[in-house]
Image (tube, rainbow, N blue to C red):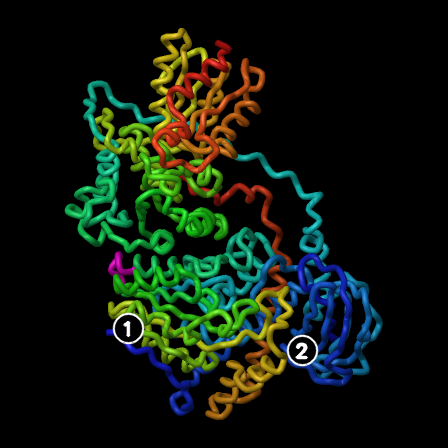
Amino acid sequence: MAKAPTKSKSSKSNSKMKRDEALKFYRDMLLIRRFEERAGQLYGMGKIAGFCHLYIGQEAVVTGMQACLKDGDQIVTGYRDHGHMLACDMDPKGVMAELTGRADGYSKGKGGSMHMFSKEKNFYGGHGIVGAQVPIGTGLGFSNRYKETDNVCVTFFGDGAANQGQIYESFNMASLWDLPVVYVIENNQYAMGTSVARASAETELYKRGISFEIEGEEVDGMDVYAVKEAGEKAIKYARSGKGPYILEMKTYRYRGHSMSDPAKYRKREEVDDIRTHHDPIDGLKARIIEADLTSEDDLKDLDKEIKALVKEAADFSLDSPEPDPSELWTDVLREVESA
Amino acid sequence: MSIDVLMPALSPTMEEGTLSKWLKKEGDTISSGDVIAEIETDKATMEVEAVDEGTLAKIIVPEGTEGVKVNSVIARLAEEGEDVSDVDDAPAPAEGGSASGDAEDADESESETAADTDAGDDAEEAPPEPEVSTLKDPRVPEGTSFVDTSLRDALRDAMAEEMRRDETVFVMGEEVAEYQGAYKVTRELLQEFGPKRVVDTPITEHGFAGLGVGAAFGGLRPVVEFMTFNFAMQAIDQIINSAAKTLYMSGGQMGCPIVFRGPNGAAARVGAQHSQDYSSWYAHVPGLKVVAPYDAADAKGLLKAAIRDPNPVIFLEHELLYGESFPVPDLEDYVLPIGKARVRRPGNDVTLVAHSRMVGFALQAAEKLAEDGIDAEVVDLRSLRPLDTDTVVESVKKTNRIVTCEEGWRFMGVGAEICATVMHEAFDYLDAPPTRVYQKDVPLPYAANLEALSLPGTADIIEAAKKVCYV
């Protein structure tokens, strides 16, 4: 019997908002927003090169999901990964220095925007091939099961990756073996320049697990509380040994696919409408004020603090030296320990 | 302190563009993320978003201006509390701008490195490639008994011993558990280690190769069996892009201790899609180790080493050798170094270099050549990456002639690499052009006679050896 996928509603009630949590969400999302704006600017100045995919607009997804995790849970994602790294508490300085290709970057400047990792923070990348992180995340779930921990791997991918075959190979094995994996589809509506409707026979991506007996749910990915609520349910399910779960986060990216995408495949009005009416940060700010959790002035101070933090990261990333030429030859292989 | 708004680049190669339109006018309030202008290059039109907040005090480059240099100041913002009229409207030099308004800091950092790095031509010369250390096979003590073992069982014994030794080692693949292995290489592993550590997968190569990589990142040591390496083509993205490259891309953080193993090369009469030698494909890739043993003792010792290796190892077996028996030393823990060739037959007249099943043909050829008075030395490469070029070059310095033998195609093949190395390292020692034996440059045919014509064998090696010896 196929389990029925469901659509969840946005969380509308402000009555249960806790001050600390609300401010943490606000702070975390704002950090991602400001960081990405600065990264975009440094790209424009030629300080960041190559591909640079910004997360602006999607902040609520990773921020809400991160709030559901406990020690030892892993996350893995594709190439739009800066937000995920900041959300799992990686140092903005190290992330920005990797973007500028410097020695103090998380990958010593050898990975770049799409290839960063932090074993310490359980962030497993940062993968540049569309969809490749999905079997990898499934394998991390497999390792949790093997080691008999109750940890869960949250595996993020986009609406574009949702059409890759390896996603379904992964779904099949994860469900067959009840692996502790939560698949988070960040549906930002466009795979590069192709809308979901033009690429997907079934546009309701949360239903993509039906053939594999995986429960799925659609979530308002612009509402951090809705994300957290759905995330807690999905992670509890996976943690309890029942197997994988799919969350489709309906979200939106404000910027082009990458920095060099002029985004001509959509109208400016469409972007403006989302920014004006559905922005995850403005939305949370209004709710914080409405619930009287803090004052506008306090939020302004927070804005300043974030701005300073991001400026510090940017300065650090420009001051850090390029990697030593000897680094060319390191990290290709690990040394074999002698017996 | 006013904030400069700079002409952005749409791509790393863009040097200038047209400022086609201002969407904000002087006196407008600007928030982070507001679209303030549009710029154009010959390739695209793009919106310029504000990073900073304030009031648009001065537009320095009017709309419609062509040839605006990247990083030149196009406008200035007055910060909150700053009087718009205090903002300087003098155009600033192109490279002097600042991201943040804190001009001094930015200038300093800019002059050092990043701005000039795309030049590339004055880049420092790369340091020399580190030398490979000298590896040695472990000494087999005198009096050690040797047990005739099939290649199949030697591989199984290697996996079983390593699984007993290390709880994190597990085997996965198609038909590895209940069926006992499509070629019975995993026979009785399920009985000893149970379904948790001997995992039957669906037919889903890309998926389980990637799952294995994830498990390795997660601290396990997977041994992933491909029913044959032909099917690993479905999974090659995960092998190359995920397993081989991640250690480097993570600056050394994320190792991937995984073995991909299975039969490689021609079987018998199974046609082109089931009969390909992938030696040169994998050996091409930095970040992988590639092993291709010939006999059972090497297979056992090298598979044990591969499972212990902290890197991804491609372990190429040969279906037509699985049933052949070879003496294997009866030692408790026989582990061989990856990256060390073995001289299987010493000789003085010509060097025959081979790996995997071709070693057997080379040894047969050497016996026949001896009857004609040609004393051939047979070097079994055993590992293709790292490649033990020292042993090959030393041999050529002695024999002055070389024939490379591989089951794969000649074009861009293993032999090409070895010949190039020999010509570079031992050019003055050569008495004949290095010569290659290989599969004919066609997909492997099914018909018995055509298949035999296509595949290299003993006769081809003899012919090539005689040619380089000019007899």
Report whether residue B72 is seen. yes
Disc 1 marks which amino acid?
Answer: Tyr
Work out whether residue B450 or residue A269 is closer to the camera in this orientation and state it. Answer: B450
Check the image and report above or below for A39 versus B433.
Answer: below
Work out whether residue B261 or residue A91 is closer to the camera in this orientation and state it. Answer: B261
Q: Is residue B7 left or right of residue B153?
A: right
Q: Residue furthest left?
A: B191
Residue A98 magenta-highlighted: no
Query: Which residue position holds label 1?
Result: A237
Disc 2 marks which amino acid?
Answer: Val
Image quarter for residue B101? bottom right
Image quarter for residue A234? bottom left
Q: CA distance from mark 1 to mark 2?
A: 43 Å
Question: Are labels 1 and 2 assigned to the same chain?
Answer: no
Q: Which chain does tag 2 point to?
A: B
Q: Is residue B158 left or right of residue A271?
A: left
Disc 2 is placed on an element classified as strand
CB within 8 Å, label 1 to label 2: no
Q: Is residue B255 left or right of residue B434?
A: left
What stretch of residues is rendered in magenta? A144-149
Q: Position of residue B53 (x, y in %)?
A: 67, 79
Report whether residue B60 is seen. no
Which residue: 50% across, 22% down? B435
Check the image and report above or below for B122 versus B5.
Answer: above
Check the image and report above or below for B302 versus A210.
Answer: above
Query: Which residue position holds label 2?
Result: B35
Which residue: 51% across, 65% down? A80
